[in-house]
Amino acid sequence: MIAKILNISPLVSVLLAIVSVQGGAAIAKSIFPVLGAAGTASLRIGLSALFLLLIFRPDLSKLTSAQWKAVIPFGLCLGAMKLVFYLAIERIPIGLGVTLEFVGPLALAVFTSKRRTDFLWILLAGAGIALIAP
């Protein structure tokens, strides 16, 4: 969505996402000694929500109860996902943790891909995961 708004190419979007995930995890891990994994996850989720509210300025009063019933569980799931990820990289190497986080989207790409060239990229990503796994 943001890529369309800013008119960014898909390749640049992927590269920015990679930098964001890796950089965010590295910064978060450096905060663990002060706040712990749960405190760091809470800080990141709270700041993300605040930035989204400030940037997109949604009118929350116009959301219907059906929309709130979708938004609240979605937010809780995202928060739980970030917390579990931070708890994991608190215990395992950050590179391995980020790689394991990537397995889900890779599996989705494998099962939904229709073009042959996609499978080459999927194979390369899978080989990278195999090389970094202990």
Image: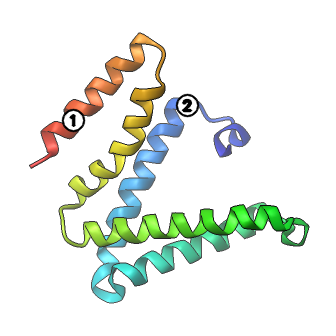
* Disc marking residue 85: none
The image quadrant where one finds the N terminus is top right
**Badge 2 is on which residue?**
10
Numbered disc 1: secondary structure: helix
Q: Is residue 6 visible?
A: yes
| Farthest-out residue, right | 62
**Badge 1 is on which residue?**
128
Residue ID at (59%, 30%): 9
Instruction: Mark 2 vs mark 1: give the one in front.
Output: 1
Q: Position of residue 85 (x, y in %)?
A: 35, 64
Q: Is residue 27 visible?
A: no
The answer for how far apart the CA atoms under marks 2 and 1 are is: 21 Å
Q: Front-most of 115 and 50? A: 115
Amino acid tagged 1 = Gly
Residue ID at (44%, 75%): 41
Residue ID at (27%, 67%): 88
Of mark 2 and mark 1, the one earlier in the sequence is 2
Say whether marks 2 and 1 touch (CB < 8 Å): no
Q: Position of residue 74 (x, y in %)?
A: 61, 62
Q: Position of residue 117 (x, y in %)?
A: 40, 13
Amino acid tagged 2 = Pro
